[in-house]
Amino acid sequence: MNSEFQKKIKNISFEIAYFLYILSLLIGLTMFKDIHSVSLFQELLRNLSYIFLVLKICIDFYDSQNKIKFIVLWLLLIGPGLIVSYVTHSITLLTTLVFVLCAYQIDFDKLLKKILIINIVFVVVTVLSSCLGIIPNLSFIQEERVRYSLGFTYPSHLTSFLFFNTLIYIFIKKNNLKTKDYLILGILSVLCYCMTDARMGLICTILVLIVFFLIYNYSHVHIPKIINRCIVCSPLIFAGITTFLAVIYDKSSMILLFLNHCLNGRLGYAKYILGKHGIDLFGNYIEWHGWVGNQGVDMISNYNFVDISYVKILANYGIVVFIFFVVFLSLLCYKAYIKKNICLQFIIFFICMYSVVEPRLIELHFNPFILLLLNQSYLLTHTEIVELKNKFLKKYKLKR
């Protein structure tokens, strides 16, 4: 089979599988899911995506020069996912891992442009449908604040879409961003906040716009070495600090109580989940209860949802999965640093920061950048790994 034709078939099968899958997940985040015919359509999309995903795997296997190595690699990476799926009674993580593996040779830049278009169309259709009364626009009353979902099952979903699509747009445009782009995105963020009252999302999105405006308009300013190092290590830093704080959280500590208040109670819920279910190698089965959908309008009493991505991954999917994502995100950030890809470097930093307040770190329909973890264009080469090893040995004066 012609190599160019093979590559084209690979890309097409992956894109169809991915778009069908994320569309089925996106529908589940809206009030469309309560319409019976749409619910059936959602299930059809998901099943079709699995078919095209299997097709992509078969083509990759046929195309691989060392088929034994291909099988071993898949078993090593997918094996833990299968165990976690059995423990958690869910194939969500397994599907995510399969997509990450299948994205190895995908042209991510081209894929991202299509993702942005699909996301914009989907959000516009959902918001308009809620305004026209086709689907409900739920209102949530929290601490005397009225928050509107605009067709989604929870108000912060729209803010999360705006945050991640802002990052996608910045990644696509890079230094071609105009002042009007920043202004339009800023205005959209404020309008979104006025309806959803998602403060954390607004703060993070505005911070993204300010930082990238400074990066691309004042590129002559040197970024201090310490800041660069912190950004490179941001997955480890955010994951380590938030998990540590959740483990040691105690209401008797005024400092921890203050931090919990700043995070809208997120540390308290994280502590509760870790205390109830513990931390296991391959995760736990947890029945999550949140405010989403009609069930959340009156604020259910058994709420236990964890918004901190790192704690949620650790409690639900276990230590192995937690280490995998944190380590490979760190390696991806390091690759961006040595290639002087400052755009990707800061995008990963902001995603890791946002993951402290929202559980979107490894959710494909929100965060497509997770597909870069094993993408051949962004993986460390053998030479780069050796250089990294030598730097580490030299710094700590270890014998080889």
Image (tube, grey):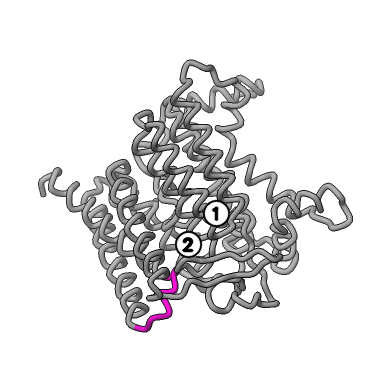
Count of numbered labels shown in the rendering: 2
Question: What residue do we see at 28% from left, 58% from top?
Answer: 57
Question: What residue do we see at 61% from left, 41% from top?
Answer: 236
Q: On the rendered structure, is 380 left or right of 324?
A: left
Image quadrant where residue 20 sits: bottom left
Q: Magenta residues, as a range?
A: 28-36
Q: Is mark 1 on a helix, strand or loop?
A: helix
Depth check, mark 2 against mark 1: the one in front is 1
Q: Answer above or below: position of 231 versus 74.
A: above
* Label 2 packing within 10 angstroms: few (<14), some (14-19), many (20+): many
Q: Answer above or below: position of 305 versus 339.
A: below
Q: Mark 1 points at which residue?
A: 193
> The C terminus is located in which quarter?
top right
Numbered circle sitting on residue 99: none
Q: How far apart are marks 2 and 1 (CA)?
A: 30 Å
Q: On the rendered structure, is 248 left or right of 311?
A: right
Q: Answer above or below: position of 302 versus 119.
A: below
Callout 1, which amino acid? Tyr
Q: Answer above or below: position of 260 versus 173.
A: below
x and y percent of residue 150 in the render?
A: 47, 66
Report the front residue among 282 and 45. Answer: 45
Numbered circle sitting on residue 93: 2
x and y percent of residue 44 in the render?
A: 30, 75
